Amino acid sequence: MDTNASALPSRRSHPPPSSPGAELETPKVPVYYVSGVQDKDKGLVAIQPLPRGTVFLEERPLFTQDPGCTNSNVLSALAGCTRDEQREYFTLSNAYKSGGKVLPALAIFQTNSFACDDSPQTAPSKQRRGIFLTASRINHSCTPNVGRIWDSGQQALVFRTLHPVQAGEELCMNYVDVLGTREERNAHLADYFGFQCACAVCALLGEELAQSDQRRATVRRLYDEVSMCLKEPTLGIRKAKLALRLLQEERLALYEATFCFDAFQLCVLVSDFGNAKAWARKAWHASCASSGLDGPAARTFKMYWANPGAHRLAGTLPRMVLSGPD
């Protein structure tokens, strides 16, 4: 159940540097099983504790399709699959079943396909998409413990844990942007997937729900505001730190690297390279959990951590000492 929407779009490439070590190694044996999950159809559940940043699933697509594919296109692709694969495909979720306006094979593809393109030059509406029979069983949570990237070298989707996961815990990603209020999130889920979320944060009531909604809405607002503080770096750092604190309270790891990289850029603007290095390191560490060490982000942050003065904004404003991560 992927969708065209996920987290907020990346404002720029968010890098990482040096090595988080063994916690990022790919397990040599299966560490999850597919099972029925309470109030859901099927889901992936951890068999054993998984450290933050563990690669627990690498999956190549069963088949891919161009944007604008038809029901006939999907049926033709399925004809090249085994009987078991065909049967499994037709057990996947269909968000269009009640309306009946989309034929079943295409409806299942639209409900479950993932983008198979990591090029920043390719618009989401033009990305080729694929079906992944195991990944399609990963359910949604508004506090996801799983992140994913498309590995163009391996031609596979790679899934990593964003937080430490306990044995017996369900592995969940986000289908839609999880900032904003519960009402906004569930409206998007209803539109794209035909269900409402019942995760722990959506189950909150009263004042607890109001506080969670406010924290997430504030982070979304700060996402735009921090990037507009290039002439007020001290204010920008304060806003980035507030966003990071709120993300920690909401257990949302998805956006941490974005705000750390913003803080890094504010520091290099005023030639505060000591604090810039600290922010680059924190952004790297956050990115490693979701994207690993080998992608473009990792290479970029490694360069900036080693030499923050290499950034194109370095020294643009008069010198000033800001602050590093808390």
Image (cartoon, rainbow, N blue to C red):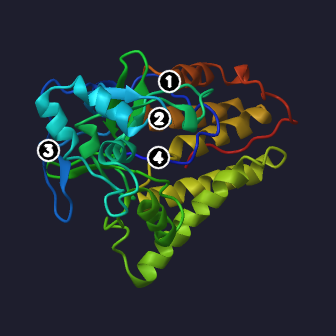
Question: Compared to 73, does 244 lie above or below?
Answer: below
Q: Earlier in the sequence, mark 3 or mark 1?
A: 3
Q: Amino acid at mark 3?
A: Val
Residue for badge 2: 287
Label 1's element?
A: helix
Which of discs 2 and 3 lies nearer the camera? The answer is 3
Mark seen at residue 298: 1
**From this viewpoint, is residue 62 visible?**
no
Q: Position of residue 87 (x, y in %)?
A: 15, 39
- Nearer to us in this view, 34 or 200: 34
Which of discs 3 and 4 lies nearer the camera? The answer is 3
Q: Amino acid at mark 2?
A: Ser
Residue for badge 4: 254
The CA span between labels 2 and 1 is 8 Å
The CA span between labels 2 and 4 is 9 Å
Mark 4, Cα crowd under 10 Å, few <14 / some 14-19 / many 20+, is: many
Question: Compared to 164, does 141 lie above or below?
Answer: below
The CA span between labels 4 and 1 is 16 Å
The residue shown at (80%, 44%) is 230
Mark 3, Cα crowd under 10 Å, few <14 / some 14-19 / many 20+, is: some
The CA span between labels 2 and 3 is 27 Å
Q: Earlier in the sequence, mark 2 or mark 3?
A: 3
Q: Amino acid at mark 4?
A: Leu
Residue for badge 3: 34
